[in-house]
Amino acid sequence: MILQTPYLLFLGDAPDPLSGKVAQGIKDWRPDLCVGQFRQEGCKADLGLPDLSIREAIDAGAKTLVVGVANRGGFISELWKGVFIEAMEAGMDIASGLHNLLTDDPKLVEVAHSRNCQLIDVRIPQVEYPIANGKPRTGKRCLAVGTDCSVGKMYTALAMDKAMRDAGRASTFRATGQTGILITGDGVPLDAVIADFMAGAVEYLTPDNDAEHWDMIEGQGSLFHASYSGVTMALVHGGAPDALVLCHEPTREHMRGLPDYQLPSLKDLRDVALTLARVVNPGCEVVGVSINTAALSEEDASKLCKDIEKEMGIPTVDPYRHGAERLIAELK
Amino acid sequence: MILQTPYLLFLGDAPDPLSGKVAQGIKDWRPDLCVGQFRQEGCKADLGLPDLSIREAIDAGAKTLVVGVANRGGFISELWKGVFIEAMEAGMDIASGLHNLLTDDPKLVEVAHSRNCQLIDVRIPQVEYPIANGKPRTGKRCLAVGTDCSVGKMYTALAMDKAMRDAGRASTFRATGQTGILITGDGVPLDAVIADFMAGAVEYLTPDNDAEHWDMIEGQGSLFHASYSGVTMALVHGGAPDALVLCHEPTREHMRGLPDYQLPSLKDLRDVALTLARVVNPGCEVVGVSINTAALSEEDASKLCKDIEKEMGIPTVDPYRHGAERLIAELK
């Protein structure tokens, strides 16, 4: 699955900025891929990009309209569909991470077929992944693992990838979820892969590479999350990481979606993740801790990172807030 | 997915007894469900059941023809298809765990449709499983976990289930693989479930039950097997076991299909499996060890079990060879 770039980011009639967070993520991490935004009447989200018509976007080189906004009511509205059809008639592909699939809509499928455009639902695997073979691969890999779901694993991997490239080092962010795939244009929608092929999909995503090259693998779920731990396990074994970064959100009161489950400690996460990772890569090390301090003041954020660093004995930062330099310095 | 019983076991033109091991498993564990066997010219397998024609099987009450033999060459032969069509025309369903799906064959689909019969490919999930909710359930659960794939987890769970029922205790074998599903007529084909729904499928398979009732859950893969560990993890968290039995095959020289991987020790398996299981069920205990001694003499088998029991400090038996009584005595 590879999306044609650059993108026109579709915000539609987004009711608030949060509903456009996929588009925001693409703009934050890959501004060079974005020619502009497309907004409809009543849109309450704004990425600060030029507002373009379909024609203007085509003239600016846009190859794919990316649905960067969550839909409401469990269906894709006629208001949106009109734009998607116009975009395809002008020659663009349409890409979406929505639960409601573009390819389930007969009218969109008909237009895509007649115009020879692609409808790309990034929730659906486009590849027949192999069964994992567990063989060592050249190059290096870093995996973000979390005390819970949604604690900042994607942002951690993206921030580390950016810091690596800013430092002139070879690095590739490897997306394993819908938003990550839309941000980078490529990846594996791991939560939608058939069980037997999960680890193989991660091996496929992180192939042999130059000796000094690092894959920054987006984590999913948590080894301690009852609903999704199997997906995380496939990342730990399929990714064969040389380095793990522990990710944590300090204000979370219980595991996401599981009110009766407490979060594990960072030490528990370290011990379990490292034991499992070393089954496949005996040289694996935990190199740092990434704290999502979005809910904290600057002062509280700095103090918390210092306290955790003292307790864990490894660099501890909020890479989105303070930069990922101290984390990538540990990747050797 | 529920198969109508009793069964006619189809052996076709099996080239050797081993190719009929699915049928052998059904006959070993559920002889009461089997009215007879169907063999074709050249068949080298024999279950010791009456050889029946389709008509005789119908008269004996058979509701489903179960394909109990592996096919050759990656296709379902015309020789077999003729029998399947005759069986459907006589009113039977057809069930299969083959990689080649019955439902991919237009002729079989056409006959099934016209005769209102079911073609049941047990490799394909028939249910939309939920996302796991991690909530405690009433009743008890035991899960077989292995140092590797194919070390005897299914036979261990079946032997424990049989010993429980022989002792007058409430127990249900819960199948998670194709052969197990064909043996019991029900279950979840876990390796074919979409990643996000694996743990939920196991919760669905092992619902609330009477306080004294035990589910004997068939294990899959191994937490130490790079290709399939994610599936195993979903069993450990979705199954929420109260008891774990460690399964091992002592002559295995490396992990199945992974020549460069050594098997973990039973102590390593115990420690990792128990740590992970207690995330969901803090009361979980490792209650025993099951050794597959098929490759050993009686004397060697007994000595090995005694030695391991001394090392591990918990009952250690080959439940298929020596009975599972000592294992189920630990289920309280």
Image (cartoon, coloured by chain):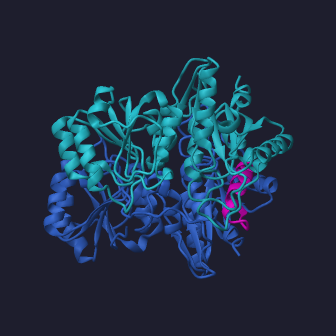
Chain colours: A blue, B cyan
- How many numbered discs, if any? 0
Which residue shows up at 47% across the image and 52% down it? B19
Residues rendered magenta in the picture: A266-289
* x then y, percent, for residue B124: 38, 46
Q: Decide: is B314 above or below A321.
A: above
Which residue shows up at 26% across the image and 38% down it? B87
Which image quarter is the C terminus of chain A in?
A: bottom right
Q: Is residue A146 magenta?
A: no
Q: Is residue A240 visible?
A: yes
Q: Is residue A273 magenta?
A: yes
Q: Is residue A298 left or right of residue A129?
A: right
Q: Can residue A13 be seen in this view?
A: no
Q: Nearer the viewer, residue A112 or B196?
A: B196
For residue A264, which quarter of the picture? top right
* x then y, percent, for residue B150: 59, 50
Q: In this view, does A17 lie to the left or right of A137?
A: left
For residue A34, which quarter of the picture? bottom left
* x then y, percent, for residue B59: 29, 26
Q: Which of A21 and A107 is in front in this view?
A: A107
Which residue shows up at 63% across the image and 24% down it? B164
Q: Nearer the viewer, residue B111 or A135?
A: B111
